[in-house]
Amino acid sequence: MVLNDLGRKINSALASLAHKPAIDAEALDAMLKDLCRALLEADVNVKLVGALRTNIKNLVNLDELASAPIASQRRLVQRAVFDELVRLVDPSVGATGATTDRWQPVKGKPNVIMFVGLQGSGKTTSCTKLAYYYAKKGFKTAMVCTDTFRAGAFDQLKQNATKAKIPYYGSYTETDPVQIAVDGVARFKKDKFELIIIDTSGCHVTEAELFGEMTSIADVVQPDNIIFVMDGTIGQSAEIQARNFKNAVNVGSIVMTKMDGHAKGGGAISAVAATGSPIIFIGTGEHMQDLERFDARGFISKMMGMGDIGGLVEKLQDLKLENKDFIKHMEQGVYTMRDFREQLTNMMSLGPMSKIMSMMPGMPADLMGAGGDEMGTKRMRKMLAVMDSMTDTELDSDGQMFKDQPTRVERLARGAGSPLVEVQMLLQMHAQFAGMVKKMGGKNGWMTQMKQMQQAQQGGGLPKGMSPQQMAKMQKQMAGKMNPQLVKQMRARMAGGRGGMPSMDEMMEMMGGAGGLAGLMGGAGGGGANPLAGLMGGAGGGGGLAEMMKNMGGALGGLGGLAGLGGFPGMK
C-alpha cells in the first residue's frame, strides 16, 4: 500500500530525534517540518496539517520535557504525534481513544444495508466483500441487485456472489429498481436472513437522478444503515462528495475503496474524516478478503509499523479454530500431518501473508518483498498438494513413519509432481512445528504450567503437587522471556493493588508503541534501526519468529513459522 510510504516518512521524521542529546524547540520544529512535508505529499489538506502541527506543539510541554530523561522525551513526543494522527483520520476519537458509537448488525434479526455511490467507485465489489466479511462471522447474509441502469450489473453481482457463496436476488426483466428491492428484501426476510445488502445504481449523468433513485428505495425499504462507497483515489475532493451525499440521504457509514496503491489515500481519508462521517471499512485490493475494518488507532499503528493487535486477533478469530481433535492434540503435545494441513488451509483463507505480517508490531510493511505474497501462496499450494497425496494413516501420524520408511517420501514426490527436496523440506517444517507443540503441551508443557499458575492465582494458593520453590522457578522462567522493563512495570502494577495480569490494552500501553513485540520479548529491535533483527532470530526467518510466537501464546504458533516459507531455498 502506498500509505506505507507515508508511514516510513513519519517514522523517519521521528527517528531524527534519536540523535539529539535533548529535545528542544529547534529539534521539535525540525521534526514537525519533516512530518508536515510527508503529510502534504500524501495529499492531506494544508489546513488539517497546520492544525495538527499546532496541536502537537501544544501537547508537548518543552519545560516538562527538559526535566525528563531523553528516552522519556522521545516517548512523549511520539505519543503526541501518534494521537494527533489518529484524530486526523477520525476526529471522533477522544483523548481516551474512545470513538462514537457506530452501527453494527445484530444477530437473530434482519439487518438491511443499502449501498450508494458514484459509478466506478467499486460499489458492487464492496457489497460482496462486506457480505463475505459478515458471513465469516456467522451471519446469514444475502445480496439484492437493484442496478438496472448499468449493463451487466446483475451479471457482475451474480458472479461475485457465486464465488463468495452468498445468496443473491435480481431480475433480468423487471426495470423498476424499487420493486426489485422490495421483492428481494421480502424474500430474504421470509427466509430469516440476518444481513441483507442492497446494491443500487451508480450514476454518471446527474446527481439528481442518483439521489432520486436512492431516496425512493430508502423510503420503501427503510434500511437500517446506508453506506456510501467512496473512491479513495480522488484525494481531497472526497470531502465535497461526502458532504453532498450526507446532505441528500441519511448516510450512516462510509467505505473507502482502492486504498492499495494510490498516494491520495491519506488525503481522501482525512478529507472524509473532516466531515464527521464514520469510515467503517477500507478496501485494500481485488480479493474477497481485501476489506479491512477501519479503526483509527489500528490504522495509524499499522501504517507506522507498530502493528495492529486488534486486527490480528480478529483475523485469528475468523479462523474458527474449533477443531476438537486439534485442541486435544495441542494439549497432549501432539502435532499430526493433518493438523499441519489444516493450519495451512486456514492461513490461505486469511488473505495475503504480507497483510497479516503488517499487523504484527515491529514488522516492516514490505517484509514479504516484491512478489512475496504470490510466491508464498504458490509454496503453500505446493505443500497442500503433497499432503493431498498422503494416505489417512500418514495424515494422522506424527511424521515419524517418513523417517522410518523413506520410500514413502519418494511416493509422495511422484504423486504430487514435486521434486523430492520439496517434500523433504515440508516434512522438516512439520518436524519443527511438532517439536514446538511438544514443548507447549503435555504434562510438563508451558501451556499446562501457565494454566496451573492462573488457577493458583485465582485460588490464592499453589498448584497441586507444586512446591513454593517450583512455583518461583516457573515464574522466573516466564519473566525471563519478557523485557525487564515490562516485568518491572507489571510488578509495580500488581504491587499497587491492581492484582492479576494486565489486560491487552494495558500491555500495549506498557510496551509503548514503537518497541512493539520486540520490546515485549526483549529483542534487539525494540525501537532500533532494524526492528526485524531481534524478532527473526537469524536470516532463515522461520525459526526465530516461530519461537517468538510460541512464547506469545499458542494461537499465533503456526502463523510465525509460515512467515518463514521463503527460508527454504529449495522451495521455488
Image (tube, grey):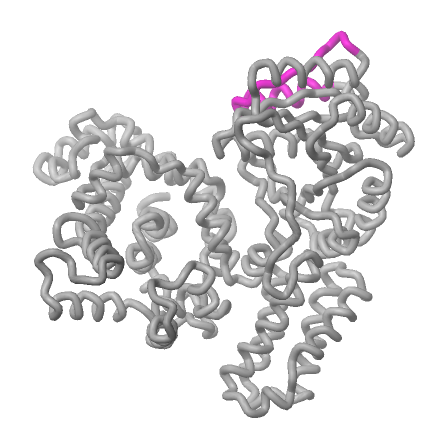
Q: Is residue 517 left or right of residue 553?
A: right
Which span of residues is magenta-colored? 152-174
Q: Position of residue 276 (x, y in %)?
A: 75, 52
- Res. 565 in view: no
Give the side of residue 77 with respect to residue 37, left or right. Answer: left
Q: Is residue 532 above or below residue 324?
A: below
Q: Could you say which quadrant of the image residue 159 lies in?
A: top right
**Is residue 302 inside the magenta stretch?**
no
Residue visible at 70% across and 13% down?
183
Q: Position of residue 197 (x, y in %)?
A: 65, 27
Residue drawn at (70%, 20%), measured in percent from left and top? Answer: 145
For the residue pair 387 and 90, the one nearer the viewer reads as: 90
- The relative height of residue 440 versus residue 110 in the rendered view (above or below) is below
Residue 301 is at least partly visible in this image: yes
Residue 523 or residue 115, whichever sits in front: 115
As drawn, the residue found furthest toward the top would be 173
**Residue 165 on the magenta segment:** yes
Q: Is residue 438 left or right of residue 186?
A: left
